[in-house]
Amino acid sequence: MVSRDLEASAFDKDLHQRIGHSYAGNSFLIIRAALRRELLLALARLWDTNSAAVRMNKIAAELADPAILDALAAELRTDADEAFRIIRKYQEGGTGHGTLNVLLDLRHQRLAHRQLAE
């Protein structure tokens, strides 16, 4: 019933007209403009020259240092090893494989598909 109401609302031109001039519609437009403004300001801040700011030029200079790259690579390797450990746990033969099967059955039978009567 709810989805039918939502679908009807999507094609209700009178509702679209009223929302466009309502407080809710205007509030949405104001919030959208504010979020767009903040996103643009945040992206522009990445290129600031202020020494206290995060700067793309500083990041590039740091990444040119082999010691920093080696440290990043070591940290990435540690994170990758942890990710592999977790993935293997849920693969066939892993200690979490039974749990994964239960979750997949739940998804297949209750969330993504409906069981047909036999």
Image: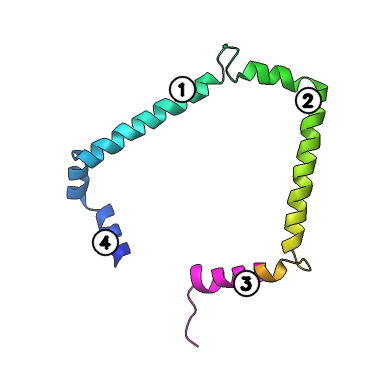
Eye-nearest disc, 1 or 2: 2
User: Which residue: 26% across, 61% down?
Assistant: 5
Three-letter residue code for mark 1 = Leu
Q: Earlier in the sequence, mark 3 or mark 4?
A: 4
User: Which residue: 66% across, 17% down?
Assistant: 58
Which residue, given by chain and number where applicable, does mark 2 sit on? 68
Marks 2 and 4 sit apart, C-alpha to C-alpha, by 56 Å
Please state which of residues 25 and 81 is positioned toward the viewer in this rendering. Answer: 81
Three-letter residue code for mark 3 = Val
Position of residue 112 measured from the top left corner of the image (x, y, whole percent): 50, 67
Marks 1 and 4 sit apart, C-alpha to C-alpha, by 39 Å
Which residue, given by chain and number where applicable, does mark 3 sit on? 102
The total of numbered circles placed on residues is: 4
Q: Is residue 103 left or right of residue 78?
A: left
Q: Earlier in the sequence, mark 2 or mark 4?
A: 4
Marks 3 and 4 sit apart, C-alpha to C-alpha, by 34 Å
Over which residues does the magenta segment extend? Answer: 100-118
Q: Is residue 107 left or right of residue 66?
A: left
Residue 41, numbered label: 1
User: Tag 3's secondary structure?
Assistant: helix
User: Which residue: 25% across, 40% down?
Assistant: 25
Marks 3 and 2 sit apart, C-alpha to C-alpha, by 43 Å
The secondary structure that most of the magenta stretch takes on is helix
